[in-house]
Amino acid sequence: EKILQRYSVNLPDGKVVRSGDYVQIQPHRCLTHDNTWPVAMRFMSTGATKIKDPSQLVFALDHDVQNKSPSNVKKYEQIQEFAKKHGVNFFPAGHGIGHQIMVEELFVWPGTLCVGSDSHSNMYGALGSLGVALVRTDAAGIFATGKSWFQCPPVVQVNLLGTLPPGVRGKDR
């Protein structure tokens, strides 16, 4: 709730974001990977010609790096050209897994809201960030407007009581 509050935009004065609320968000960063070209095509199909905030985006090619087929090479070239044209943070194939790049290059840190067009984007929670997976259409919307929407998830508190036996941690069952 606190992170969503910080990254929500156009809230009524005094509005406190709570579980279940729908909010418009302006995430700190948005990661796309090998799916960047389909996202870019959706972006362009809306008539958009300029990325709202190039510094908000990170393109990291990491899924199909071993594929040297002409179609994949062409897709990677299109992504690189699109990134260069718009001034987007770009990491070509061979630089590592996109989510690790997000961490190592300091695009994500505690308290930030980072989204990605990949189901593993929630891994940013390990850093105290709110990581949210988006579909390609929502990512294209962020390319164009810098914003998207989100429903605040349920919030739970876990209290560990007593002393855990040696070798047991909070994630153990």
Image: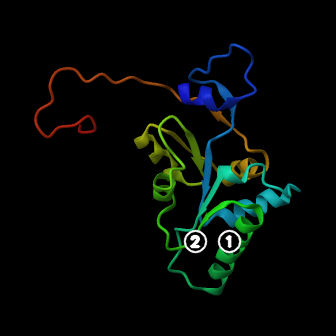
Would you say the residues marked 2 and 1 are in contact, meaning their CB atoms lie under 8 Å apart? yes
| Type of the residue with mark 2 | Pro
SS type, badge 2: loop
> Considering depth in this image, is 171 or 4 the residue closer to the camera?
4
Residue at 54%, 73% in the rendered image = 93
Determine which residue is flagged by label 2.
92
Q: Which numbered tag is attached to residue 80?
A: 1
In this rendering, position of residue 11 left or right of residue 119: right
Q: Could you say which is closer to the camera, residue 42 or residue 163?
A: 163
Residue at 47%, 63% (x, y): give it.
97
* Residue 66 on image: x %, y %: 50, 80
**SS class of the residue under badge 1?**
helix
- The answer to whether 120 appears left or right of 13 in the picture is left
Query: Where does residue 27 sit, x and y in percent of width and height?
Result: 64, 41
| Mark 1, other Cα within 10 Å: few <14 / some 14–19 / many ≥20 | many
Q: Is residue 1 visible?
A: no
Is residue 113 toward the left or the right of residue 100 in the image? Answer: right
Above or below, 75 relative to 99: below
Q: Residue furthest left?
A: 166
Q: Does residue 135 sit above or below 128 in this rendering?
A: below
Is residue 7 visible from the viewing direction of this image? yes
19 relative to 46, above or below:
above
Asked where in the image residue 72 lies, by quadrant, the reply is bottom right
Q: CA distance from mark 2 to mark 1?
A: 7 Å
Residue in the image at 72% along x and 54% along y: 54
Few, some or many residues within 10 Å of mark 2 (<14, 14–19, 20+): some
Task: Tell me the amino acid under the disc marked 1.
Answer: Gln
Image quadrant where one finds the C terminus: top left
Residue at 49 percent of width and 39 percent of height: 129
* Residue 5 in the figure: left or right of residue 62: right
